[in-house]
Image (cartoon, grey):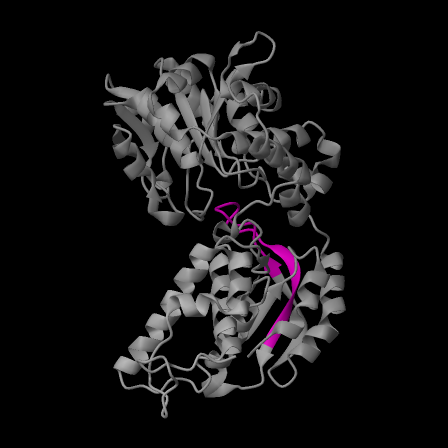
C-alpha cells in the first residue's frame, strides 16, 4: 500500500504532487495501527508528526524525497526504528573490558545476588523503612544497618549518607562550622568530578588550616597550628595518588593522641574503604576503618560502592556523641539514602559476617582475586571466534596485560591479567581511524563492549568477563 498524494477534489492527479499525507491517514495504515498497540498511541503519533515534518522540510528545501517515502512498508519501517530507539533505556548493561574493575563511568561495584534480591524487595513491596516492628512505633532508618556496621568495625555508632563526599561534608559542617580544621598540605586531594577537599571544607563552613609541605608533614606542624579556634584534626587518605621519595607523614595514632591531649576529635577520611585485610586475599594492603578506630580515630568516613563492593553510599562510624551530633544536623535529611540503598547495603554487610566465603560471593572481591590462569583460558577460548569476526579488519592475539582496581583505590598497584588485542590491518597513516572504527563497532553492539586503546591495539581485558558466551554470541552483529 502506498500513500499517493491526492488532488484538491479528492481524485488522483495526473502527475503526483509533492504533498505530505495527513497524520490521521498515516495512523490508520494497518501496519502503523499495529505500532500503536505496541508502543502506545501518543508516542506513535508524535513519531509520525516528526517524520512528516522532516519530509516537509526536505520539500521546502527543494530536496528530493526517497522514491518509496510514502510506501506503507517504508513508513512502518522508519517509525518502528524510531520508536524502538526511543524506548531503549539510557542506562544499559555493558561489558566492562577496560581493565579497571571499579570503573566510575561504568557503575563501579557490581552488587551480589543477595543485594539485588534485597533491592527488588524494597522497590516492589512495602517495607519497614522507618517503622520499629518490635515496638510498633516510628523507627530510624539508620537502625537497619547500624548494628551490622558496629559489629564489623567495632565502632560505637554509625550512620549513612549518599556518598563519601557527602559524609565528609556533613561531618565537617556538624563538627567544624565556623571553626578551624587542620589538615596536612599533602592530603588536600582532588578526586573525579573536581571534588576537592578545600572546596568541601569551605562549603561546609570550616576554615582550612593546612600544615606541612606537599611531601613532608610532621607532628609538630599540627601541634603548632592548634589554637582556640580549632575544631578538629583531619587526616585524608590519598587513595588516588601516591607521593614517593623524600616524604614524611604523621601516623594516625600520633595525631589521635595529639587531638585528645587538646580535647579535640580526630577524623579520618578513608575515601575508598574496605572492611577486610586485602592481604589475606593476595591483594595490596589498603587501610580499613577498623585500623583507624584502633589507632584512636574518633570518626571515620568511607565509601560503600568502591572496595566495600556495595551500593553508592557514604558511611560514617565512630564515637556515639559525634554521630549523634551529625544525625541532628538538618542537612542529614537532605543527604540521606533511600530504601533501596539501605536494602543493598545491609545485604552486602551481611556477607562480611562470613569472611571465609566472601571472595566467592562478593563480585568486587571475586574479580580482584580472579586467577590469572582462568583469565588466560577465557582469552584462548574466545580467540578463534574473535579472529573470524575480525578477518580482514584486524589481527587478534592474546596478550598479557595489567588490570587496575580503580575508583581511587591503590593507584600504583596493578593486577596481572590477559586481554584480546585487536590490531588493525591498516597500519601507518590510517591506523588511528581504523582503531576508532573498531572501538565504535564494539561500543555499538546490542550489549556494548567497552575496552581501551593501548599500544596500537584495541584491548579487551577479560578480568571482568565472567560470561564469555555473551561476548561471543554477538560478534556476528559487528559492523565496521
Q: Could you tell me which quadrant the C terminus lies in?
A: bottom right
Horizontal placement of 381 versus 396: left or right?
right
**Image coords of residue 8 (percent x, y):** 30, 80
Rendered position, 399 above or below 389: above
**Image coords of residue 94 (percent x, y):** 57, 57
**Image coords of residue 44 (percent x, y):** 45, 61
Between 222 and 446, the residue placed more toward the observer is 446
Q: Quadrant of residue 132?
A: top right
Between 140 and 218, the residue placed more toward the observer is 140
Task: Report the magenta residues as a range.
Answer: 402-422
Rendered position, 450 above or below 156: below
Residue 171 visible here: no
User: Which residue sits furthest top?
Assistant: 135
Q: Residue at x 33, y 38 (%)?
A: 197
Q: Quadrant of residue 416?
A: bottom right
Rendered position, 35 above or below 267: below
Q: Residue at x 46, y 56 (%)?
A: 41
Amino acid at each position: 500500500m502506498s500513500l499517493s498524494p491526492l488532488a484538491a477534489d479528492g481524485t488522483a492527479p495526473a502527475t503526483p504532487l509533492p504533498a505530505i499525507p495527513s497524520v490521521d491517514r498515516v495512523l490508520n495504515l494497518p501496519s502503523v495501527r499495529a505500532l500503536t498497540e505496541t508502543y502506545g498511541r501518543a508516542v506513535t503519533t508524535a513519531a509520525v508528526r516528526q517524520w512528516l515534518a522532516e519530509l516537509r522540510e526536505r520539500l521546502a528545501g527543494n530536496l528530493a524525497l526517497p522514491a518509496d517515502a510514502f510506501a506503507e512498508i517504508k513508513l512502518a519501517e522508519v517509525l518502528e526504528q524510531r520508536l524502538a530507539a526511543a524506548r531503549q533505556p539510557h542506562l544499559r548493561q555493558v561489558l566492562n573490558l577496560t581493565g579497571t574493575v571499579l570503573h566510575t563511568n561504568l557503575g563501579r561495584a557490581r552488587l551480589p545476588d543477595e543485594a539485588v534480591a534485597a533491592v527488588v524487595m524494597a522497590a516492589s513491596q512495602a517495607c519497614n523503612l522507618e517503622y520499629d516492628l518490635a515496638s510498633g512505633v516510628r523507627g530510624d532508618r539508620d537502625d537497619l544497618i547500624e548494628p551490622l556496621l558496629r559489629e564489623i568495625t567495632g565502632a560505637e555508632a554509625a550512620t549513612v549518607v549518599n556518598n563519601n563526599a557527602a559524609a565528609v561534608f556533613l561531618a565537617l559542617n556538624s563538627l567544624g562550622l565556623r571553626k578551624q580544621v587542620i589538615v596536612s598540605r599533602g592530603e588536600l586531594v582532588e578526586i573525579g568530578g573536581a571534588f576537592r577537599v578545600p572546596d568541601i571544607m569551605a562549603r561546609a563552613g570550616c576554615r582550612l588550616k593546612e600544615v606541612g609541605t606537599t611531601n613532608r608533614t610532621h607532628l609538630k606542624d599540627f601541634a603548632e597550628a592548634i589554637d582556640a579556634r580549632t575544631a578538629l584534626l583531619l587526616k585524608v587518605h590519598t587513595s588516588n595518588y601516591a607521593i614517593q621519595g623524600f616524604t614524611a607523614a604523621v601516623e594516625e595514632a600520633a595525631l589521635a593522641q595529639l587531638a585528645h591531649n587538646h580535647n579535640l576529635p580526630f577524623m579520618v577520611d578513608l575515601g575508598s574503604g574496605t572492611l577486610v585485610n586485602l592481604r589475606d586475599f593476595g591483594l595490596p594492603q589498603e587501610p580499613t576503618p577498623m585500623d583507624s578506630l584502633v589507632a584512636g580515630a574518633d570518626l571515620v568516613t568511607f565509601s560503600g560502592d568502591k572496595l566495600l563492593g556495595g551500593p553508592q553510599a557514604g558511611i560514617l562510624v565512630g564515637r556515639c556523641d559525634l554521630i549523634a551530633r551529625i544525625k541532628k544536623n538538618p542537612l542529614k535529611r537532605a543527604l540521606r539514602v533511600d530504601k533501596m540503598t539501605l536494602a543493598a547495603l545491609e545485604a552486602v554487610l551481611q556477607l562480611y559476617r562470613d569472611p571465609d566465603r566472601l571472595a566467592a560471593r562478593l563480585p568486587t572481591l571475586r574479580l580482584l582475586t580472579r586467577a590469572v590462569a582462568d583469565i588466560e583460558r577465557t582469552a584462548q577460548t574466545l580467540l578463534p571466534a574473535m579472529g573470524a569476526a575480525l578477518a580482514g579488519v584486524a589481527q587478534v592475539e592474546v596478550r598479557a596485560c595489567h588490570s587496575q582496581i580503580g575508583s581511587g583505590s591503590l593507584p600504583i598497584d596493578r593486577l596481572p591479567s590477559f586481554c584480546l588485542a585487536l590490531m588493525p590491518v591498516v597500519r601507518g597513516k590510517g591506523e588511528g581511524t581504523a582503531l576508532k572504527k573498531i572501538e565504535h563497532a564494539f561500543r555499538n553492539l546490542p550489549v556494548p563492549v567497552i575496552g581501551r586503546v593501548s599500544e596500537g591495539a584495541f584491548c579487551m581485558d577479560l578480568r571482568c568477563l565472567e560470561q564469555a558466551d555473551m561476548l561471543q554470541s554477538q560478534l556476528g552483529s559487528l559492523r565496521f
